[in-house]
Image (tube, rainbow, N blue to C red):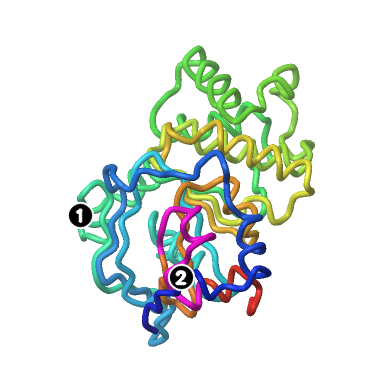
Amino acid sequence: MTADARDTSSRTPEAQATRDIYLPPERKKVSEGGVPHVIAKNFSIYYGEFEAVKKVNVDILSKYVTAIIGPSGCGKSTFLRSINRMNDLIPSCHTTGGLLFDGEDIYGKFTDEVLLRKKIGMVFQKPNPFPKSIFENIAYGPKLHGIQDKKALAEIVERSLRKAALWDEVSDRLDKNALGLSGGQQQRLCVARTLAVEPEILLLDEPTSALDPKATAKIEDLIQELRGSYTIMIVTHNMQQASRVSDFTMFFYEGVLVEHAPTAQLFTNPKDRMTEDYITGRFS
């Protein structure tokens, strides 16, 4: 697959109009400077002999929101999960090339996976609260990392729920089972649970695909609140969502990173023909 620079004068008005609806007006200009937080160098991921992600080269900048888009089965979630080594849970999965976090090899033999996952938290497609109280869900991670003081735990729980925009809704029922929350509340609880251990990076794997529009809007608002404080990466099938929440967008197709650019640029002036065909609906 090769890059195919396009002449914008040849674009049809219909195609341009399709792209225009995705332009995030509040972020028309995004600085391409910044400090890389995650760097992939010829990074590939295999399931057995099958190469699911193919020789990716990309810098993910610190404190920005990066969306990952592409059709089903293109390697989006596989790449995302590789960043905190969730793919290690699949026996046949292995990697080649380099994947660095703050300059250190994520797949190095001396990497502490527990510490890595503390620094790089993840929220999954389906909300997965523990069958415990709301308080115990948030306190679980800090306790696991050695914090036992009740006052300190209470402060962490409140701070994390406030960051996840959930405190006002649950502050009077922290002792209630988290499974009693709505789907959207459960997903924000999972974000709060991740934030409780003070990560640097937040990975979101289609976090709104199981939610209704109202709950989806709250998660998107939450991402806006967290931007600038964390490096956030979100896998999404929803291109409008990618445009609303992200500063940068990566487009994957059949395991290949076709294009990575500031979101406004990728949606309005893509450099690769395949990117343009995907965002204008010529294939999905």
Q: Amino acid at mark 2?
A: Ile
Q: Residue under circle 1?
A: 110
In the rendered picture of this protein, how many numbered marks are placed on residues?
2
* Residue located 64% across and 76% down the image: 284
Residue 92, above or below 142? below
**Label 1 environment density (alpha carbons within 10 Å; few <14, some 14–19, many ≥20):** few
Q: Residue under circle 2?
A: 90
* Residue located 30% across and 70% down the image: 43
- Pick whichever, 133 or 208, lies toward us: 208
Q: Does the stretch in magenta take in 273? A: yes
The outermost residue toward the top is 151
Q: Amino acid at mark 1?
A: Phe
Q: Does the stretch in magenta take in 249? A: no
Tell me how far mark 1 sits from mark 2, CA to CA.
20 Å
Residue 117, above or below 148? below
Residue 239, above or below 195? below
The outermost residue toward the front is 9
Check disc 1 and report its element: helix, strand or loop.
loop
* Residue located 57% across and 33% down the image: 192
* Residue located 62% across and 26% down the image: 135
**Magenta stretch?**
260-275
Residue 107, percent from left and from top: 27, 61
- Pick whichever, 25 or 238, lies toward us: 25
Check disc 2 and report its element: helix, strand or loop.
loop
Quarter of the image that includes the N terminus: bottom left
Residue 155, percent from left and from top: 52, 16
**Label 2 environment density (alpha carbons within 10 Å; few <14, some 14–19, many ≥20):** few
- Pick whichever, 161 or 269, lies toward us: 269
